[in-house]
Image: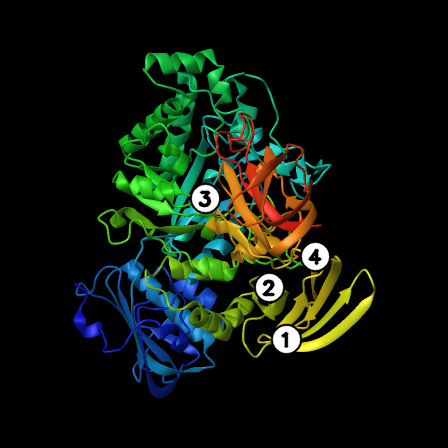
Amino acid sequence: MRNSIFYLLISICYNVCAQSAVLPCPKQFRSFSEDLRISNIIGIDSHNKPWITYMKKMLPKCIIQPYSSNISDQTRLLIQISNELDSNTYNLRFDNSGFTLISGSESAEFCGIVSLIQIIQSSDGSSPSFDIVDYPDFNWRGIHLDVSRHFFQTDEIKRVLDLMALYKLNKFHWHLTDDQGWRIQIDKYPLLTEIGGYRDSTLVGHYSDIPQQYDHTVYGGYYTKSDVHEVIEYAEKLNIEVIPEIELPGHSSAALAAYPELSCLGEVEGVPGTWGVFEDIYCTKEPTILFLQDVLGEVVELFPSKYVHIGGDEAPRVRWKNCSECQKVISINNLADEKELQSYFIGRMDAFLAAKGKTLIGWDEILEGGLSPNATVMSWRGESGGIEAAKQEHFAVMTPTTYCYLDYYQSTHDNEPTAIGGYLPLEKVYEFNVIPGELKDTKYAKYILGGQGNLWTEYILNLRGIEYMMFPRAIALSQAVWSKNKPEYSQFLETYLNYHENLLANYDVNYARSIHLPKLNTTRRKDGLGIHFEGPGQSYLFNVHWSNLDKGILNKKVISELDTLHFVRSTEQRNILFTVVGNDSSHISRFPITMHSAIGLPIEFITKPHPKYAHNGDLNIVDGVIGEIPWKGSQWTGFNTDKVEFVIDFTELKNIDKLNLGLLENKGQWIYFPQNISILTSKNGKSWKGKIKTENVSRNTIINIGRETRYIKVVMESIGAIPDGEQGAGNIPWTFIDELFIR
């Protein structure tokens, strides 16, 4: 039991953020009125601590030394481990005697030190006295980093670990192998790094660019075993567990470039310089299994972590269907199909790792064909994988793309660096609830270990890029994976803006400033559209210019967040450009809007959009915002269903000539044009008139209607399942709409 003496009589926890400089916000925080000086010298009574070096590094303006009663100009830090506290709990106090940190374990002690570092670094040399009691609700508070697409040196990895530790993130998921590079030394198989560690070209620009262009410079690198030891030892001092990932059976092109005999075809191919999913994967024959067990054996010797991640995601099985060796394995082991073959393949790794005292963890595809007995699931394709694993009484880590993919765009501003796609602003990350609603208050909730943010590096070229994509979103994530009950986002944002932007700047972090830039919001008006701009506070003022690009008309106005510009629906199409300068005048934001005759019309979604891509609800497809390519999620409405159906209401009878739908295709991201689109019309919303069908679907699909109607029903049918050989094969493709025009 947590010692009740440390539970102060305060109301928690929703106003804690506003009072404390600590993020993630502590469970309990009490501030007293007395303002006390923090000396430039911090005297630690117990100096033989692994975190001392980190504390000195993160508090460069302070002198950290052993406590001496003979030195008057110092602030004392008293450290104690107490068995009266739960092992995860720390109590940090500041009063006339200095700082006192009492913890239930060394890991809890480190969390207390991190809070202390934040407080001192955020202060101006003094602080009110206070008392903090805090502990995490989840043990898995992770960050994943892909070093295959782009490689990062050990010093850069240490920088990532430093910043993770600053926000109490304690699991570093090191994605060491993938199609584009093998990054870890394996003594028994030196060609993995000699050949698999380097590629002779790399995609330049975005995957969706036509034509694709390449930099034909040799690119690569790998970590020696000495490098790995160095990173692990560094992480251990920061209370961080390093978890290696060796991808199998898919995402294995780099390994197969080195040892082609491990594939089904045995053909020699180079390490790919582009992104995506490739058909060549490990063959399931016995020599391949023994090879991978050899590799995992060396990995297990290197990493003290409880877990070894084996990937398991995005493995096309098309090669297995036509491979006599794989079909022989299916027959000998009485397997039903290739899904069960993958389960068998992973099960062999599971048994091997279990015999070594390790726990296998893999992406949620390892559920297909049956979950291995000892496996832990990392749920990325939404929450369903984690829910299914928990109900099978297996542990799970939640990392759904909706909230946790930090390689997505964090704003729609034109100055954002190129990203893979999608839209994940700071407030969306903060909405992440680790325990899925379906499991809350059930016996299965205990199987959810925590959550993790993922950084895939197709478009992250260097350390500054990592920092930009991580921060401030990793801070919002740290709060979500620390506490089941979070303060309101507005309180979190206030603490971040008051303390942590300066803190990041002091540490020279290349954090994103997107929240300071104006954000376009649209609202439905009876006769058109309301447009207003939002900043990070209600005192925000915007200098707005807008111009009708077709007629050269210019308007100018200074507005606040509370002001709304009103634009009336018109049969005349108008292309308007808003040029906005906010309080942060260092950047000018531009927002093009196309005014048209369907602006703001009522839409009924019979098929509901996926929550991940339901920005602004049904207004999103009649708000005049044309989706950009490469795509940014907030501009598009996305559906992950076989059929999409919705109804447009013109509010009165109209002669409709044509309907124009803006659609997206990006097969690398599982987004496909519909196979066909059907149109039905109705004057009363009950009886529907003859179907108009087209299979000529493109980016801008125009359908001739030529009828008087009040309602139009649009029905879009997908291709059913993504074909074999394509990324996401077998999954339902996404359908994306940006705008609907009526003529």
Residue 328 in the image: above or below residue 155: above
Residue 263 in the image: above or below residue 139: above
In primary-sequence order, the first of circles 2 and 1 is: 2
Specify the quadrant that holds the N terminus: bottom left
Camera-side mark, 2 or 4: 4
Residue topped by disc 1: 583
Left or right of residue 449, residue 167 in this image: right
In primary-sequence order, the first of circles 3 and 2 is: 3
- The CA span between labels 4 and 3 is 49 Å
Left or right of residue 358, residue 603 in this image: right
Residue type, mark 3 in image? Trp
Residue type, mark 1 in image? Asn
Camera-side mark, 1 or 3: 1
Residue topped by disc 3: 174
Picture disc at residue 596: 4
- The CA span between labels 1 and 4 is 31 Å
Left or right of residue 87, residue 515 in this image: right
Residue 684 locus on image (x, y percent): 54, 50
* Mark 1 element type: loop
